[in-house]
Image (cartoon, rainbow, N blue to C red):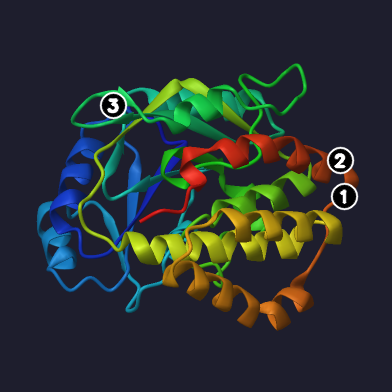
Amino acid sequence: MSDGRVTVVVITRDRRDELLRTLGELARLPEGPSVIVTDNASSDGTVEAVARRYPGVRLLRAGRNLGAVGRNVAVREVRTPYVAFCDDDSWWEPGSLARAADLLDKHPRLATVTARIVVEPQGVEDPVVRELRESPLPGPSWLPGPALGSFLAAATVIRTDAFRAVGGFSPRLWLGGEEELLATDLAVRGWWLVYAPELTIHHQPSRAGDSTRRRIHGIRNTLWFTWLRRPTWAALRRTFRLARTVPRDGASVRAFGEAFAGLPWVLRERRVVPAEVEARLRLLEPAQRDSSARRYVG
């Protein structure tokens, strides 16, 4: 039986074959979710192929590459209480969307549930799953899993109203670690984020894409988030630590250059988080230092 509580939102650009595979997997889900795809100005025939093969999919044509903001565009069209984000190279396991909706129904202060990620075709857990499972954050006793400080957009179901209330993903961050700012703004408003191991999403990484550009944006966006929300002493400490640990190459220089060029905007938009949220961010720092996901290589 179909479940009308969740809409799946996918952003894509020039990954026609991967997207068609993902849409095929989503079409077979027993929950029968509505699917909205934002195409970020593909030039490989993606739009035509989706319209032909999957006429029931709502297809939004951005006209330019919006990055993560393509998700914002799609969420404006959502009419269900929950949104499941999905990349064009990943797909939800049958039953996971219904279980995610059940968790969000049961816990009204829960904003996001993040799934276990299985890497295909090997069928092994993504290394980041261990970090989610071993999150150091304390949380209230009612939480149905480990509390998280951020989430992975491609593996998360989020409460639609909560997403809209914080303004969605920042257009300035574009793509690459864009979740950290949104997650922190949710926490400031009293929402909780959780890892739910009973949910599963499959990820078969695309060979397309520019890993160096993603590293540039990852470093830049980490700096911008830190300067936007952390107290001065914490922001300076994290900035200096990042400067010491990133690779010594042109990509890192460019990332810091872009970050410093954005300082006027950062200072205008800076809003330091309350003490209780900052305490959580401090608890995450050791795990972030040791995380393989924050090596910024590529």
The local crowd at label 3, few if under 14, some if 14 to 19, many if 20 or more residues have their Cα within 10 Å, is: some
In percent of the image, x 77 and y 41: which residue is there?
A: 282
Q: Position of residue 162 (x, y in %)?
A: 65, 48
Foreground mark, 2 or 3?
Answer: 2
CA distance separating discs 1 and 3: 42 Å
Residue 108 horizontal side relative to residue 63, left or right: right
Cβ atoms at labels 1 and 2 below 8 Å apart:
yes
Taking the image as shown, residue 124 lies to the left or right of residue 231, namely left
Circle 1 residue: 274
Q: Position of residue 2 (x, y in %)?
A: 33, 29
Q: Amino acid at mark 3?
A: Pro
Q: Is residue 254 left or right of residue 17?
A: right
List x then y, in percent, for residue 241: 67, 54
Q: CA distance from mark 1 to mark 2?
A: 6 Å
**Which quadrant of the figure has residue 95?**
top left
Q: Tell me if I can see residue 78 in this picture.
A: yes
The amino acid beneath tag 1 is Pro
Q: Height in image: 8 above or below 209?
A: above
Depicted 55 relative to depicted 192: above or below? below
- Estimate how packed mark 2 is, as few (under 14), some (14 to 19) or many (20 or more) residues with alpha carbons within 10 Å: few
Check disc 2 and report its element: helix, strand or loop.
helix
The residue singled out by tag 3 in the image is 30
Mark 1 burial class by Cα count in 10 Å: few <14, some 14-19, many 20+: few
Q: Which residue is mark 2?
A: 276
Q: Secondary structure at mark 3?
A: loop
